[in-house]
Image: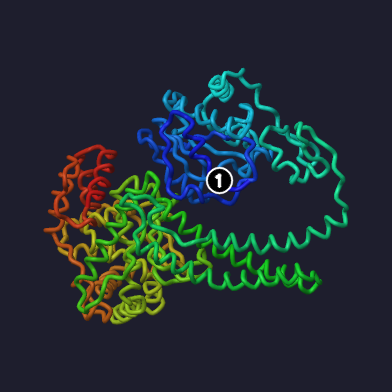
């Protein structure tokens, strides 16, 4: 059976509004084998009010599953969206092959999956659509099944969350027939028993392997036919197999296509055109070698079909294996970015877009004040969400294991969900952006060299100097984060690294992270030199009260004893030393944060608490604004969180 291009016409046999999604006639994961069932689903979308918020996902898929995800989408108001005519990824693993993706039509109804009461207009539309489908394809109403009824193992799915027997009764009543019998148990293995025939089957039943020995006569009954000779089957099977291997790999290659920006929605949170183009350029480099192998496999398969010698068949199988290895490598990269881009269609898209705006503000501030002419690198950093405790970053141009050691095309900032829920802790964004800036400004060698020179000049012993140099990247992140965000960054840092004494005094000879206890004193030293002496002193007192006994810790005594001299030297080396990568300026000359900026932040916090425009302040300052509003108790945390993201979304 080809693509089901009559689906829109079938849907219009109802009284419902039918909307054809552009491209539906050719959309699918391949051709349908036939239609034996209609499988009903609900979308389980968090959005409780929009009419059809899941449409883009049904068309394009999710990070873990490629689209299309159904043939039809059914909105809360009863509108029918025709999404695809080919095979769709909707059923998954099923108890009976007749219910699988190749043999069933999928309908995804918009619903949370937790609300027990469905809109009557939607359920009525659901029943109408199922009725015209079973009539068109000559099915019994018993072939209208819930995903929860077909999924294997039983209990794996719960959709749709209404009584399917009652629903089938409603579908049946539309045709004036008796309600169907309960859902049948899964059929035995296909090789043993044929499915029950219906009026649409004669055109395809003889081609099924379990119907090898019979065909349908005009009366609709089985008529024995002469079995094919085993030798003939063996003779035909090998060329078909060889042809299929080349076909399968080529189709897999074609499926790993370029991304389009519009397939990730129309909202501002979707990836920028620059991000999409950068990923597509990476995919193009991966597809080149793969395409060459696939073309060789085509030729080898043709040669083996023409004369299936051992050497020719072996060559085809060898190329198939190589092609599959390359396909998997390409697919890993494709899936990685599909997941990242797909997050922008979720309920957290606005949050991630807000984080992007903060990272871009940091880049703009730094690059606009360099001592030399340099363009802001593009594409800018791209934020995505993960569960877990710590944020992370992946710099532009470094080989990533998850990309098969290919170069990362733009900076990635990974943010834990719990930080995004508490935006006053998002000084982490400023820290992670700073890691990227160290590379973008060609300071990855200059900064550790500067630290080493300054510490040696201060008289710090060489073994201890080596420790501080090893910590240079994390120190740089803290220093630049402090200069970008001011006292709110230091408070956010203390939120993160303030743990048990054993953890905060923790020291590892090989770690690239400074001992947490010392990190706060580094930031306080810089904050004092930025003009916030009183605030820096307050942070020092609080930190010392939290950890009053450093000499009783496991910190190396010499490291602890020399820290009062080393800390000012390190701050001087990183923040107040001119670098060629900055056009001969020091970082403190490039990044401005002064007491007047803190006053702007506090005023923005008062406005933010009221839900009004916080004023013309840089995006990065809103982290300090929401923290100031929280500390002053100006609004409850949930309201502050919502206002924070809402104000960034308006920019």
- Disc 1 packing (10 Å; few <14; some 14–19; many ≥20): many
- In the picture, measured across the screen, residue 256 lies left or right of residue 348, that is right
Q: Residue furthest front?
A: 218
The image quarter in which residue 361 lies: bottom left
Above-or-below relation of 54 to 496: above
Of 282 and 434, nearer the camera is 282
Q: Residue at x 47, y 29 (%)?
A: 14
In the structure shown, which secondary structural element does the residue marked by tag 1 occupy?
loop
**Residue drawn at (48%, 69%), measured in percent from left and top?**
284
- Report the number of numbered marks: 1
Reply above or below: 109 against 62: above
Across and down, in percent, residue 308 comes to 79, 69
Tell me if residue 524 can be seen.
no
Q: Position of residue 52 (x, y in %)?
A: 40, 38
- The quarter of the picture where residue 530 lies is bottom left
Left or right of 485, for residue 151: right
Give how far across and how far down residue 145 sits, in percent. Answer: 60, 31
The answer to which of 7 and 344 lies nearer the viewer is 7
Q: Nearer the viewer, residue 600 or 413?
A: 413
Q: Which residue is mark 1?
A: 88
Work out whether residue 28 can be spotted.
yes
Q: State left or right for residue 540 relative to residue 196.
A: left
Is 68 above or below relative to 234? above
Q: How is the image coloured?
A: rainbow
Residue 35 percent location from the top left of the image: 62, 39
The residue depicted at 59 percent of the width and 22 percent of the height is 165
């Amino acid at each position: 059976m080809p693509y089901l291009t009559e689906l829109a016409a079938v849907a219009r046999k109802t009284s419902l509004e039918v909307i054809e999604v552009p491209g539906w006639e050719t959309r699918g994961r391949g051709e349908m084998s036939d239609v034996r069932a209609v499988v009903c689903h609900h979308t389980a979308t968090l959005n409780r009010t929009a009419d059809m918020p899941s449409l883009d996902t049904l068309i394009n898929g999710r990070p873990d599953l490629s689209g299309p995800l159904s043939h039809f989408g059914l909105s809360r108001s009863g509108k029918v969206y025709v999404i695809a005519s080919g095979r769709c990824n909707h059923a998954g693993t099923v108890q009976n092959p007749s219910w699988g993706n190749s043999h069933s039509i999928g309908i995804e109804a918009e619903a949370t999956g937790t609300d027990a009461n469905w809109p009557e207009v939607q359920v009525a539309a659901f029943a109408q659509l199922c009725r015209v489908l079973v009539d068109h394809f000559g099915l019994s109403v018993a072939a209208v099944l819930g995903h929860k009824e077909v999924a294997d193992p039983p209990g794996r799915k719960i959709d749709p969350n209404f009584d399917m027997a009652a629903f089938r009764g409603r579908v049946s009543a539309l045709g004036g027939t008796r309600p169907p019998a309960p859902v049948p148990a899964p059929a035995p293995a296909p090789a043993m028993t044929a499915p029950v025939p219906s009026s649409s089957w004669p055109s395809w039943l003889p081609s099924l392997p379990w119907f090898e020995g019979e065909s349908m006569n005009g009366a609709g009954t089985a008529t024995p036919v002469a079995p094919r000779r085993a030798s003939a089957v063996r003779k035909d099977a090998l060329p078909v197999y060889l042809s299929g291997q080349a076909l399968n790999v080529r189709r897999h290659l074609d499926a790993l296509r370029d991304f389009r920006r519009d397939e990730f929605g129309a909202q501002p949170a979707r990836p920028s055109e620059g991000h999409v183009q950068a990923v597509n350029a990476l995919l193009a480099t991966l597809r080149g070698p793969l395409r060459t192998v696939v073309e060789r496999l085509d030729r080898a398969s043709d040669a083996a079909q023409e004369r299936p010698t051992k050497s020719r068949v072996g060559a085809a199988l060898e190329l198939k294996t190589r092609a599959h290895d390359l396909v998997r490598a390409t697919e890993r990269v494709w899936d990685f970015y599909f997941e990242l881009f797909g997050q922008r269609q979720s309920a957290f898209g606005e949050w991630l877009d807000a984080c992007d705006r903060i990272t871009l503000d940091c880049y703009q501030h730094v690059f606009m004040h360099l001592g030399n002419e340099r363009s802001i690198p593009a594409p800018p950093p791209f934020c995505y969400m993960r569960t877990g405790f710590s944020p992370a970053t992946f710099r532009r141009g470094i080989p990533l294991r998850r990309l098969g050691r290919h170069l990362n095309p733009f900076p990635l900032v990974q943010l834990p969900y719990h930080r995004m829920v508490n935006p006053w802790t998002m000084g982490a964004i400023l820290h992670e952006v700073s890691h990227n800036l160290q590379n973008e400004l060609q300071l990855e060698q200059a900064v550790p060299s500067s630290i080493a020179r300054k510490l040696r000049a201060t008289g710090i012993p060489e073994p201890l100097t080596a420790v501080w140099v090893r910590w240079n990247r994390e120190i740089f992140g803290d220093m630049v984060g402090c200069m970008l965000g001011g006292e709110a960054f230091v408070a956010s840092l203390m939120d993160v690294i303030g743990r048990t004494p054993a953890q905060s005094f923790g020291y590892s000879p090989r770690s690239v992270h400074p001992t947490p206890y010392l990190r706060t004193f580094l930031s306080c030293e810089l904050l004092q030199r930025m003009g916030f002496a009183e605030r820096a002193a307050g942070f020092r007192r609080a930190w010392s009260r939290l950890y009053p006994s450093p000499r009783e810790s496991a910190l190396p005594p010499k490291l602890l004893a020399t820290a009062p001299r080393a800390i000012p030297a390190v701050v001087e080396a990183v923040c107040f030393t001119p670098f060629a990568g900055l056009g001969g300026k020091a970082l403190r000359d490039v990044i401005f944060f002064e007491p007047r900026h803190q006053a702007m932040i506090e005023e923005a916090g008062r406005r933010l608490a009221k839900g009004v425009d916080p004023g013309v302040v840089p995006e990065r300052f809103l982290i300090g604004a929401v923290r100031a509003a929280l500390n002053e108790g100006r609004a409850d945390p949930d309201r502050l969180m919502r206002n924070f993201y809402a104000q960034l979304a308006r920019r």
